[in-house]
């Protein structure tokens, strides 16, 4: 009997470790994109002259041990099933258009006009949208199962400003820091260049074993903050459990993949 009890206890522990708290968009509450939002539409070929049309989709990553970055419906320092909320003052999360009131949406033109996240013709089911200039910090110490070992996100300018919003759809640069140390900085990213859509840019880097804080600093690209509707698509923290499973429906990493590690 004691041996049976031991195996049952070990089995329960195994289930706890294997399940943990995994992110899911269905757990993020009601879709709060406002009635004034610009419609988004799937097309055969994305048109630079139209806002929020897309011809590619990045689905939610459903692997175990994934924690998506969120603003509203997540928790910190331990994420819930929606994701991980920032740990710093919410007044710093966006340089304009706040207060933020939804996850998986862009800044829009204010709280009642949020849009789905489309960057360079790709629709991201998960992600966070903001406006330069912004600083967003995440506590990395609360992973419910095993530590976070990697960060991934696609960054760029929201297609809600394609391109008439400012001639090129806004500009931003993205800086990523771990424990206060810069691990990656993008070039200045525009919504469009020479009449061509600028695709989202993949940023991915490994996290050190002592990682305690992730800081994302979004700049104005050096030309002021007008139209700088900045987005991070599929922004997430990964654990070894996540990496042990091959992702499905992943975008091809051919648009200037950027890798950094300690």
Image (cartoon, helix red, strand yellow):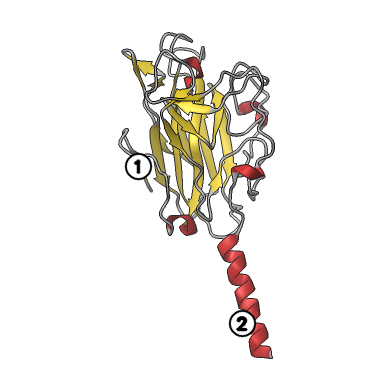
Location of residue 89 in the rendering, given as x and y in whole percent from the top left corner: 66, 32
Asked whether residue 179 appears in the rendered view, the answer is: no
Q: Identify the residue shown where x is 49% and y is 15%.
A: 161
Q: In this view, does 21 lie above or below 193?
A: below
Q: Residues within 10 Å of mark 1 (few under 14, many from 20)?
A: few
Mark 1 or mark 2: name the one nearer the start of the chain.
Answer: 2
What is the distance, in whole Å, between disc 1 and disc 2 at their CAs? Answer: 43 Å
* Residue at mark 2: 7
Left or right: 88 in relation to 204? right
User: Tag 2, which secondary structure?
Assistant: helix
The residue closer to the viewer here, 79 or 77, is 79
Location of residue 34 in the rendering, given as x and y in whole percent from the top left corner: 66, 22
The residue closer to the viewer here, 63 or 182, is 63
* Residue at mark 1: 259
Q: Quadrant of residue 112?
A: top right
Q: Identify the residue shown where x is 69% and y is 35%.
A: 30
- Mark 1 vs mark 2, foreground winner is 2
Residue furthest out toward the front: 44
Which circle marks residue 227 in the picture? Answer: none
Left or right: 203 in relation to 30? left
């Amino acid at each position: 009997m004691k041996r049976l009890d031991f195996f049952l206890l070990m089995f329960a522990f195994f289930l706890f470790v294997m399940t943990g708290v995994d992110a899911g968009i269905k757990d993020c509450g009601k879709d709060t994109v406002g009635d004034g939002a610009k419609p988004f539409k799937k097309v055969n070929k994305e048109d630079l002259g139209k806002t929020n049309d897309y011809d590619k989709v990045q689905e939610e990553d459903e692997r175990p041990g994934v924690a998506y970055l969120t603003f509203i419906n997540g928790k910190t320092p331990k994420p819930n099933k929606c994701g991980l909320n920032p740990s710093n003052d919410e007044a710093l999360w966006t340089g304009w258009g706040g207060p933020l009131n939804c996850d998986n949406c862009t800044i829009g033109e204010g709280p009642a006009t949020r849009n789905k996240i489309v960057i360079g013709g790709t629709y991201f089911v998960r992600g966070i949208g903001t406006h330069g200039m912004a600083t967003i910090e995440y506590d990395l110490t609360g992973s419910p199962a095993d530590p976070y070992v990697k960060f991934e996100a696609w960054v760029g300018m929201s297609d809600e400003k394609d391109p008439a919003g400012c001639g090129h759809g806004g500009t931003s640069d993205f800086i990523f820091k771990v424990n206060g140390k810069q691990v990656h900085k993008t070039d200045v990213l525009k919504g469009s260049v020479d009449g061509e859509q600028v695709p989202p840019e993949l940023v991915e880097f490994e996290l050190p074993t002592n990682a305690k804080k992730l800081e994302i600093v979004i700049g104005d690209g050096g030309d002021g903050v007008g139209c700088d509707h900045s987005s991070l698509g599929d922004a997430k923290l990964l654990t070894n459990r996540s990496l042990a499973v091959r992702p499905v429906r992943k975008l091809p990493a051919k648009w200037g993949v950027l890798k950094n590690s300690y």
